[in-house]
Amino acid sequence: MKKMKLIKKTMTLALSLAMVLSLAACTGGSMGPGKPNPANSGSQSQGGGSSAQQPTSGTTYKVGIVKFMDHASLDQIESSLQAELDVLGKELGVTFNYADYSANGQMDGTILQQIGAQMIANDVDVIVPIATPAVQAMLAAAEDTEIPILFSAVSDPIKDGIVADLNAPGGKATGTSDALNTEMVMQLMLAANPDIQKVGLLYSKSESSSAKPVEEAKAYLTAKGIAFEEKTGTNTNEISSAVDALVAAKVDAIFTPTDNTVQNAELAIFEKLQEAKIPHYGGADSFALNGAFCGYGVDYVQLGQETARMVADLLVEGKDPASTPVRIMTAESAVINIETCAAIGMDLEQIKSAFSALGISVIETATQQSFS
């Protein structure tokens, strides 16, 4: 199996449009524990969309994939999404071709707007945006078309105005959610260290998906009489400085929700936290895979696979996004980085026992620079 992917790695405002226009559609090819909880033939006219008619054998669909940025979690979703669609394509006798784009975390929206325009120009049959900012931009770009949006990794689809209801989205968008169980992360933190006095909250204010879990964490800690220190950043340098401030504040642990900006910075900060003996709890397994002490959240490989199944249902089976429930993934395991666990002086077997008492199993990992 082969696939070509041309993903923008650097963009300046002056060159961004030219770079977007240079991206080409890619040929389909192939290249942990979550559970879904259900809460047109060919590329034809602009607007694409799904059809109630079953396709004939050999039908080809254009799938436009947009990542908000390139980092471990979102890369996992994209890779597993395409791999699963390749499998489903063989089973269903159809072909899925991919056009892959990344906005490199540009928050001003310019790049995402241009990517949206290129998706429409490429006459894709469905747009699959990964992470909330990409979803919001694609909805705006495709507003006057019939192109459906099948999103992935949106923490709060209702709060962010993406769907009207999880069970009946009511528009052209549906997809998968990686909503975080913040209370469980707090419970894991206290199970590992019942004597915690102060918790650091590390996130990016520019990402709306982080707001709700941070507020939930504050409420939980306040109810328990535990102090918290809040630090934010909008890029890797600012996140690194925020970590320095949390270390200086002598926090006992740090919590980060499913925050793309911090995830992107994890490889630049985990050694600082190891040296300071501070465990970092992130809202996805990929935090631990990139050096954090603990990652708890949905399995992004399974999230990508579930998203692929929804794409196939929409395009091949003719499912209507407006009446297709958003599928919320849940987690049953915590991923512990055994290298970091040892470096900060925590007992792995004790951690396993404490987490098991909460019904959470432990998956062990070591630090990786990249993975899929």
Image: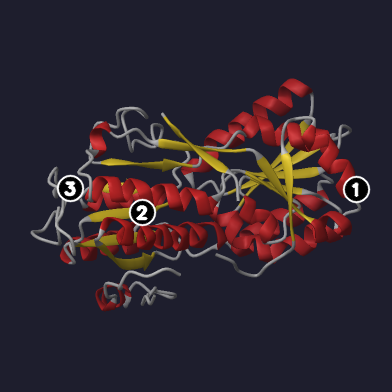
Kindly report the distance in space between the C-alpha atoms of the residues bearing marks 1 and 2.
Answer: 40 Å
Given residues 309 and 162, the one toward you in this image is: 309
Whether residues under marks 3 and 1 lie with C-beta atoms below 8 angstroms apart, the answer is: no
Report the amino acid beneath label 1.
Answer: Asp
Depicted 12 relative to depicted 202: above or below = below
Report the amino acid beneath label 2.
Answer: Pro
Residue 296's quadrant in the figure?
top right
Kindly report the distance in space between the C-alpha atoms of the residues bearing marks 3 and 1.
Answer: 53 Å
Q: Position of residue 127 (x, y in %)?
A: 28, 55
**Which residue reaches farthest left?**
45
Depicted 86 relative to depicted 252: above or below = below
Q: Position of residue 283 (x, y in %)?
A: 62, 45
Between label 3 and label 1, give the one nearer the viewer.
Answer: 3
User: How many numbered marks are there?
Assistant: 3
Residue at point 32% right, 69% down? 28
Between label 3 and label 2, give the one nearer the viewer.
Answer: 3
Residue at point 69% right, 26% down? 220
Residue 311 lies left or right of residue 301; in this view the side is left
Whether residues under marks 1 and 2 lie with C-beta atoms below 8 angstroms apart, the answer is: no
**N-term mark: 3 or 2:** 3
Q: Quadrant of the N terminus?
A: bottom left
Residue at point 81% right, 44% down? 251
Kindly report the distance in space between the C-alpha atoms of the residues bearing marks 3 and 2.
Answer: 17 Å
Depicted 325 relative to depicted 300: above or below = above
Where disc 1 sits, the SS reads: loop
Residue 330 lies left or right of residue 347; in this view the side is left
Q: Which mark is residue 129?
A: 2
Q: Which mark is residue 347?
A: 1
Residue 128's quadrant in the figure?
bottom left
Residue 32 lies left or right of residue 101; in this view the side is right
Q: Which mark is residue 50?
A: 3
